[in-house]
Image: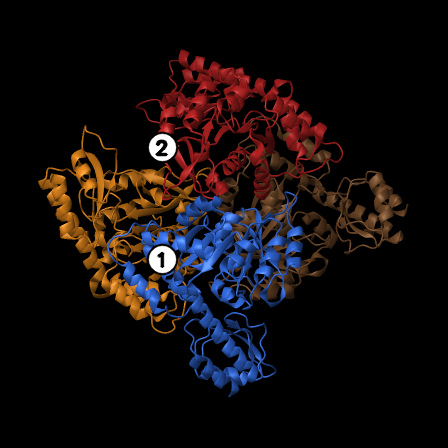
Chain colours: A orange, B blue, C red, D brown
Amino acid sequence: MFFASDNASPVPPQVMAALAEANQGYAMPYGNDPIMARVRARIRAIFEAPEAAVYLVATGTAANSLSLAIACPPWGAVFCHRQAHIEADECGAPEFYTGGAKLVLVDGAEGRMTPGALAAAIARTGGSVHGVQRGAVSITNATEAGTVYAPAAVAALTAAAGGLPCHMDGARFANALVASGATPAEMTWRAGIDILSFGGTKNGLLGVEAVVIFDPAKAWEFELRRKRAGHLFSKHRYLSAQMLAYLSDDLWLTLARDANAMAQRMAAGLAAAGVTCDHPVEANILFPRLPRAAHDRLHAAGAAYYPMEALTDDRPALARLVCSWSTTEAEVDAFLALVSG
Amino acid sequence: MFFASDNASPVPPQVMAALAEANQGYAMPYGNDPIMARVRARIRAIFEAPEAAVYLVATGTAANSLSLAIACPPWGAVFCHRQAHIEADECGAPEFYTGGAKLVLVDGAEGRMTPGALAAAIARTGGSVHGVQRGAVSITNATEAGTVYAPAAVAALTAAAGGLPCHMDGARFANALVASGATPAEMTWRAGIDILSFGGTKNGLLGVEAVVIFDPAKAWEFELRRKRAGHLFSKHRYLSAQMLAYLSDDLWLTLARDANAMAQRMAAGLAAAGVTCDHPVEANILFPRLPRAAHDRLHAAGAAYYPMEALTDDRPALARLVCSWSTTEAEVDAFLALVSG
Amino acid sequence: MFFASDNASPVPPQVMAALAEANQGYAMPYGNDPIMARVRARIRAIFEAPEAAVYLVATGTAANSLSLAIACPPWGAVFCHRQAHIEADECGAPEFYTGGAKLVLVDGAEGRMTPGALAAAIARTGGSVHGVQRGAVSITNATEAGTVYAPAAVAALTAAAGGLPCHMDGARFANALVASGATPAEMTWRAGIDILSFGGTKNGLLGVEAVVIFDPAKAWEFELRRKRAGHLFSKHRYLSAQMLAYLSDDLWLTLARDANAMAQRMAAGLAAAGVTCDHPVEANILFPRLPRAAHDRLHAAGAAYYPMEALTDDRPALARLVCSWSTTEAEVDAFLALVSG
Amino acid sequence: MFFASDNASPVPPQVMAALAEANQGYAMPYGNDPIMARVRARIRAIFEAPEAAVYLVATGTAANSLSLAIACPPWGAVFCHRQAHIEADECGAPEFYTGGAKLVLVDGAEGRMTPGALAAAIARTGGSVHGVQRGAVSITNATEAGTVYAPAAVAALTAAAGGLPCHMDGARFANALVASGATPAEMTWRAGIDILSFGGTKNGLLGVEAVVIFDPAKAWEFELRRKRAGHLFSKHRYLSAQMLAYLSDDLWLTLARDANAMAQRMAAGLAAAGVTCDHPVEANILFPRLPRAAHDRLHAAGAAYYPMEALTDDRPALARLVCSWSTTEAEVDAFLALVSG
């Protein structure tokens, strides 16, 4: 019963097999391995973006920060949701990578920025030399609240961005995509996204994210920033191999569907048990409000998940549950049994 | 016949097996995996440093730059050899990570700084507010010239450092260690080294380096800088597993001995063929001066290595050859056969 | 009728005379001029702080940013009011100077942070490696709303800061001081302030601010940061001379009293005219809500001030008026006459 | 007898008078004062550059660093002479302002880079992602050795720059200009200079330098960087007034001619006394080698200048003498009398 995060899961066998297969003989370093050429072609095909620049890094924070660094100058503002990972969970990496940009926080229910709030924040920013300037917009999909922006919602935000470069933090891109039924192109560049952090790690890889830059004008700058940050791997083939396996036979979509399905199973069970959740369950994360007794039983049984507030006898306390590709029905059912007592 | 770099080699089976073994069930992320606890204990034992802080990152540039960032303030000078990797091959990563420190270049034959040249460079630096201040010393072992500092040579440099923090870039630490016959402690903290980039990637791992901080006062700062730079891995167990395999059964030493032995075999063969090398062959790198005809034969046969200067008919042209754990006697002998023509 | 800002005023004759007097013969550069020694002694005496380090820079942004840079690491949070000058009016200078720290915005009526809101913001910050850490607190006095923290209010904030370094942005320190009746020591280090940006420019100088560091442990770091930022003046005597004149014969307090008195005269006149102001008028800034007709009359007469919202016929529109040492009763009365129509 | 630096001199009466004249009534802040409009027009006329962007800052380090920051990316190399002020005397300001660029040092006799050495340094830089890229060239005129580049020498360097942006550190631009007999345009944009730090402080101002950007495409970026660095003055009129006085009636040229003439008088006297100098005396700096007895007499008489090496009885010891606009014939002659003993 592990629901603490999708970054604690193991790796599916196809990915391990791909690593083993890649481990033959010599391979040119620094992204010049032949597997990377196939990854690039595959991502361009999947995204219907034959000109896109495609790079691999090993962590989501690297993907996001390097993306923002080519989108926003040091004196720029990055507009993002108040709960965005780049604001709350990266120890200031965007500020470090951009050379000191400012994150301007936008509110919105269910983890989603509204176009109106985004437009208002942008309107308040810039103009005179005294304040930071409008820099870039970053949209997290799926959100930290476990909700999903449909392509139309993304397009509404990028329209509100008024021409600013738009980045999507897609650490859980696959979960959002299968939830929405959209194509990768519809969810990204057709909706106005310029740069995508295309997550792999939370969805089953050892540690690989792709950065997809739909307008490759800044590709060389990205390469220099990546190298300068120590995120260019010499034995790059082991990143490439993971990503190629991920993209083969729709593995990435299958893994995300499995994770989302477990979240739906959990949501249904919770509802049946009379437990309410704080946000719609649209991807692989749930925020149930569980009575203290349920927390106690789960804790005693060793269930792993994050409480989001202090436990009291007065009212149910919020918890966060994350399902992953490796979550089993048995795990979900065992959890639900403990909730019901 | 691949001698272009030791970063193009595959990974030994013990490491792949360790990855597979680690891929079981859930594991706490961000370095809290149980394998990391074993890695930490093992490195402390190997280095006879029970208080050392030990961290893993995935690239040598990250290891070096994060190490320098905790050793040198933004207004400091990092003293290093003119050919040091941190100066020549990291696209300014030390400057980025330190917030703009200045690398002050020290000369010395065979890729080695001399204590006198180091002391002179330090003496010329700092004092008034107008120039950068004395910051840190970085010593590469094995050097970019393929030579090795013995512990006494390291100690002479750290003595010349006059109390400045001393970093060792040990991307090829194992190669230097087995060449010198020293213990890890003798080569590092007993010789005055404060922080070590303990390389794994060039010596057989997919992509892992340990940073060993002998005085752990700056450990928390290191953790924050690592996170902020996107170098803290969520699925950290896959780094830990590589490193644990590397340190088990002296695998790391065996791999380095194999690489160095192949370099010696090559050196002997070259000498027999009348080819001279630019630096003593002490680790796993050689710099032979090969006649144009030899270059042509090697090139035609598909041998991979870097020429270091333009080919002419006038004189032999310098080349760089790097052996790795996976270099075979057959590869070396085939190369030598082509040299002799 | 100039009420747009206190940074558009001329300089009192005592300061110009001091410049002329300083302009004799040679003087050692870079802060080693003899006038600076007198400034240092004078500020230590005024603040009853014989150990304080004292430095001069030429702009408020430099004073604030350099102060924050020695108080907050790159991965730290600076807690400040949402309307603070460092957040809204310095184009990201704190982020630039700190190497990418994050400003965490604290709310509070009348431009003042409440201790509770500050403590809550601090409590939400830091702890794990994933977020930025608690760095420093910055308190603006007088505030951007023209209100003043009394020493007890400052002490309540520094208590809430829980040991974090506390900076005071005193661009209008003199205005706050004379409004409160406190001594400089009471308003600063006795109330828990560690570093003060002691403003001179808005209160009558050509362009000089002092940074007063009550605990001088970081004095040398400050000197290096100042030099590295290009804020160490070679012909420093001309900064020193301004500041010495400012501190002589209580000129700085007289100038501030004059500015505050004009604000009070304006406030009384506005109240008599039935105009309400948005914040208590405690220093030298007022925020009246003026009917459109009054705005139109003032505009036609060439009165200079900033409207803070669009004019409509529906309701009075907010304006900001700033008095300075050079504001005359005649200017105030002329303004009031136009308000009344 | 003050020859320590030209930054310890007082300010000529015309400049003080201009300050007093500017000190009337209110003036718009932040460079919007009417005097600045006249400065801009005057500099454009003097440089025959009607499109040039013109900004004022208060220190040479600010002028240089902000100029380099718009010319060179964080991953770039700034090519400059080994003795350049930006390398030796600014505590790493260029690294700070550029976000971590690397200064690549070029050798050359008499303080002057040779085109060949510059071209070679550029040729060694960049190309692959592993090293820093070619960024900008910075040429100091007059040089730190007191020598001057004629326009043709500047043009030879900018040609060697191969299209890189070329900056001139003109802290002593006026001294170089009058020495060379060139026009401002010939010395700058007609010779391939893109950005000029046009010095005022060392040549008689309290503390003002102009940055002249001949191609204004980066003007807005400069304004943002200046503000963000705290180098935008609110009471900007006092900078403008200094610069306007400097440019009026050829004051700047007169001051420089006076300083250079005193250096020539000193050089002639030294030669007559049998003293040799290390570099040709072309501007306002001399490097004589003085016997110990002369040093002792000068020191006893209170002469201020910098010895550049330790005094010994064995041979004359190098000294640096700097003349300024305020140096008198009497000072020079008194110095010479002491040299002769």
Query: Which residue is painted at 32% across and 38% down in the image?
Result: A120
Please identify the quarter of the rendering in which residue B327 is found. bottom left
- Identify the chain of the residue marked 1, using the numbered disc in the image: B
View extreme (right): residue: D341
- Identify the chain of the residue marked 2, using the numbered disc in the image: C
Where is residue A141? Give x, y as percent.
26, 49
Where disc 1 sits, the SS reads helix
Task: Name the mark on residue B139.
Answer: none
Q: In the figure, A325 relative to A235: above or below?
A: above
The residue wearing badge 2 is C123
Query: Which residue is painted at 30% across and 23% down in the image?
Result: C314
Label 1 to label 2: alpha-carbon separation: 33 Å
Please identify the quarter of the rendering in which residue C51 is found. top right
Amino acid of disc 2 = Ala
The residue wearing badge 1 is B239
Where is residue B11? Give x, y as percent.
37, 68
Where is residue A259? Give x, y as percent.
19, 53
Position of residue D303 in the picture relative to residue C295 (left or right): right
Residues C263 and B207: in front is: B207
Position of residue C270 in the picture relative to residue B86 (left or right): left
Q: Note whether residue D135 is visible.
A: no
View extreme (top): residue: C272
Where is residue A239? Give x, y as percent.
34, 63
Q: In the figure, A271 relative to D84: above or below?
A: above
**Badge 1 and badge 2 in a common chain:** no
Q: Note whether residue C338 is visible.
A: yes
Where disc 2 sits, the SS reads helix
Query: Which quadrant would the N terminus of chain D be assigned to in this image?
Result: top right
Amino acid of disc 1 = Leu
View extreme (left): residue: A272
Query: Which quadrant would the C terminus of chain D be assigned to in this image?
Result: top right
